Image: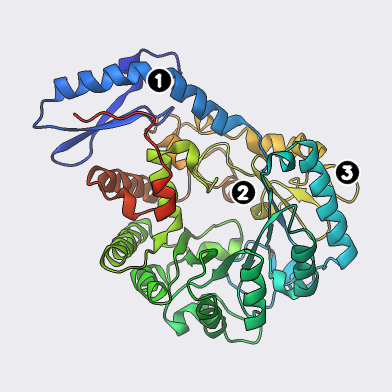
Amino acid sequence: MPKNLKYEERLVSSNLNDNQLLSLDPHNVFWGITSKQAGESIASDKILSLYKKVRNRLDAQMEDFRFSANLTAIYIDPTDRCNADCPYCYVPAQIRKNGKQMNEEQLKYVLQKIARYFKRLALLKKNIKPVIIFHASEPLLAKDIIFKAISDFGKQFHFGLQTNALLLEQADVEFLKKHRVGVGISLDSSDPQMNNKQRLSREGNGNFAQAVQAIEWFDGYKGLNVIATITKFNVGHLPELVKFLHSKRVSCVLLNPLRLTAKPARKLQPEQSLMTKYFIEAVQKAMELSRSSNHRIIIGNFANTILAIVAPTARRLMCDISPCGGGRCFLTITTSGEMIPCGEFIGLDGSSGGNIFKTTISKAMQSKPFKKIRARIVEKIDECKVCEFRNICGAPCPAELHSLGNMYQPSVFCEFYKEIIKYAFKLIAEDKAKYLIREEGWKNLEYDYNLSV
C-alpha cells in the first residue's frame, strides 16, 4: 500500500469481535480498538485525530526498523556435526554426519575479526555488546573451545548457546550461569516417547532425559529458553508442555512452527487449524499459570507478536518483519567460514556472502546474496501487500520459501499467523498483554501514544 494515501484511506477497519472494531494502519502498525456500542463515528473521529498527529513519526520509525542494516548478532557454527538425528533438521544429513569442526585457533581468529568489526562500528565504545550465539548442529561437540572462547571474550560479547543437552553436564550448567550465557534447550514434548520420536539421538534414543535433567540443573535461570518445534505429531502436546515447563520453573518457551526448508521436514507439516487451536490453548495455559502462581512463563514467539502490536520496534525475534533479520541484523558463520544470511540457508546454493577466513564481514553485508534477502519485502508479494497484518507477520521464512521454489510467496503457515495475530489483538483489548511478555519488559514500556475512547 503506498504511503502517500489519505489518512482515511490508510486506516483499515475490521471486526475484532461482536462488540469491538479494530482500526489499523498496516504500514506503521498504528491501531485503535473501539466499542461498537459507543458509537463508531465518534470513536473513529477521535482515533483519526490522534492518527494524523503521529502518522509521520510512526512511518519514520517503522522505516528505520525495517530497513536499517544494524548487525548486532552473529551466529557461529563451531561444528557441522550432530549427535542427534532430528527428522526436520534444516542442516543436510550428510553434513551433520561427516562435517567439519573448527579448532581453537580458527574460532579465536573468527571472534577477533568480529570484535574488530564491531569496534569500528563504535558499538563497543557505547557499551553495547554484540551477541554471539553458538548454534547449528550440536555446538557442545566443540565444548572445550566454546567454553574457552566464552571465558576469553566475555568483555567483548554477550554469548548464547543452542543445544540438545545430550552432552550437557552439571558443571557445564554452572559455568554457563556464571558467565550469564543465554541458553536454548530443545524439547518438543513433555511426553518422553513423543519427544524422543522427534528429537532422536544417533544412539537410537532421544534427548528427553538429558534435556529435563539440564532444565532442572538450571533451576529457574532467567537466561534459559526451551525451544519446541511444532510438527503434526506433537501439535496436540503444546498446552501440556507449557504446564510441564512451568513446573520446572522455566520462564520462556518458544513454540516454533516447523520450517519446511529441508525436504524430509515436509512430511511432518502440521495442519494450520490444529496448530492454531493448540497454540492458543498453550497461550491460555501459560497465562493461567502465570496469573495463579508466583512464577511467570511466557511463549516467546507469541510475546513477540504482542510486542509487534504494542511496541513494533521493540520486538526481538526478527523473523516476523520484512525484510527479515537475516543478512541485516544477524548472520551465520559456518564451520568452514562461509558467511550466510541465516542458518536456514545452510546447504542452499548461492547463499554465501564470502568466507571470513578470506574476506570481511563488511563485504559480506554488501554481497549480492545478502542484498537479495534484504530486498525480499512483503510489498513485493501480491497476497501480502494488501494484507492488514503484513508488518506484524512479515511472511516468514525466505529460506524456506526459496527452497519451495519461490521466495516471493506468502508464508507456508499464513492462515495460522493471521489467526494468532487476531487472537493477540483480542487479548490486548482484554487488557491481558501484561501477562504475555516478560514482567521486566512490560515495566520498561512507555506509551508513545494513547487514547481512551
Q: How many C-alpha atoms fall within 10 Å of the one at disc 1: few (<14), some, or many (≥20)?
A: some
Please say if the residues under marks 1 and 2 sit with CB atoms less than 8 Å apart: no
Quick check: 325 above or below 21?
Answer: below
| Mark drawn on residue 359 | 3
Q: Position of residue 30 (x, y in %)?
A: 36, 29
Which element is circle 3 on? loop
Which element is circle 2 on? helix
Q: Which residue type carries mark 3?
A: Thr
Which residue: 75% across, 36% down?
121
Q: Which residue type carries mark 2?
A: Ala
Q: Position of residue 188 (x, y in %)?
A: 48, 72
- Residue located beneath label 2 in the image: 399
Q: Earlier in the sequence, mark 2 or mark 3?
A: 3
Q: How many C-alpha atoms fall within 10 Å of the one at disc 2: few (<14), some, or many (≥20)?
A: many
Which residue: 35% across, 50% down?
420
Left or right of 164? Residue 366 is right
Q: CA distance from mark 2 to mark 3?
A: 24 Å
Q: Quadrant of residue 255?
A: bottom left
Q: CA distance from mark 1 to mark 2?
A: 33 Å
Q: CA distance from mark 1 to mark 3?
A: 42 Å
Q: Position of residue 35 (x, y in %)?
A: 15, 33
Which element is circle 1 on? helix
Left or right of 73? Residue 194 is left
Please say if the residues under marks 1 and 3 sit with CB atoms less than 8 Å apart: no
| Mark drawn on residue 55 | 1
Left or right of 350? Residue 244 is left
